[in-house]
Image: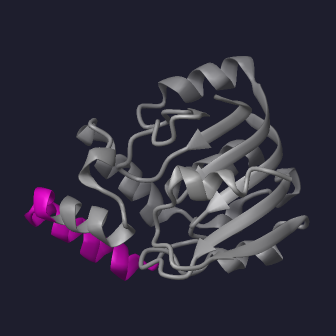
Amino acid sequence: MLNNILFLSGWAQKPNLYSNISYLDYYNHSNINLIEKNGSKFKKIIGWSLGGQVALRLLSESILQADELILINTAFNFDNHDMYSFQESLSKNFTKTIKMFQKLIGSNIDNLHLNHKYYDYWLNELYNYDCNNLNFNKIPKTKILYSSNDKIVSNSNLFLNKISDSQLIKLDNLNHFITEESLIEYLHD
């Protein structure tokens, strides 16, 4: 287990995707409530997709603290039309849409978070989310990783102008999902 590193997973994905990294299961808010009471300081916080947006919120509100943030394929904001279309597809054929989503992100069905009742809540959070409302002064040094073949997120580069100490890193030949082996490479300073 890598010490003092916290991972926040993406929408509809298991919180413990990576076996060597501690994780926060924010889906039902219970872990976040514990952190709000006790506060937490980490060497690194890794947020993938929706997990990156949640990490940014928690850092900007000083609920979490870190020396470094790693954002992986995290959207600055989403196109409302695309989100509406996806929500509509989910309501018509949930199973087919989820399977298509897993294939699109380059992951497999085994990585799905089993607690489906929170999918709509967090999808609505994505729908309404816009990073323009964050206090970026509280965001630590940040690596912004984006995949060249990502079909979900295309605007991670917008963080570069908002986070003062940040660098943009292109991940060639990867989809939205990043394997643990690929991620480990970026955990070193």
Give the residue at x 49% y 24%. 30
Q: Is residue 65 above or below residue 100?
A: above
Residue 183 found in image quarter: bottom right
Q: Is residue 135 magenta?
A: no
Q: 72 or 158: which is nearer to us?
A: 72
Q: Where in the figure is residue 129, as x and y percent of width and height?
A: 53, 62
Q: Is residue 46 above or below residue 147?
A: above
Residue 48 found in image quarter: bottom right
Give the residue at x 90% y 64%. 165
Q: Quadrant of the N terminus?
A: top right
Q: Where in the figure is residue 43, as x and y percent of width and height?
A: 82, 37
Number of marks: 0
What secondary structure is the stretch in magenta mostly built from? helix
Q: Is residue 47 above or below residue 42?
A: below
Q: 111 or 79: which is nearer to us?
A: 111
Instruction: Pick out the residue farthest to the left.
Output: 92
Residue 52 seen in this snapshot: no
Give the residue at x 48% y 33%. 25
Q: Where in the figure is residue 142, as x and y percent of width and height?
A: 80, 59
Q: 139 or 67: which is nearer to us?
A: 67
In this image, 60 relative to 36: left or right? right
Q: Is residue 95 magenta?
A: yes
Visual colour scheme: one colour
In this image, 181 relative to 187: left or right? left
Magenta segment:
79-96
In this image, 182 relative to 10: left or right? right
In this image, 101 relative to 21: left or right? left
Residue 165 seen in this snapshot: yes
Give the residue at x 58% y 79%. 172
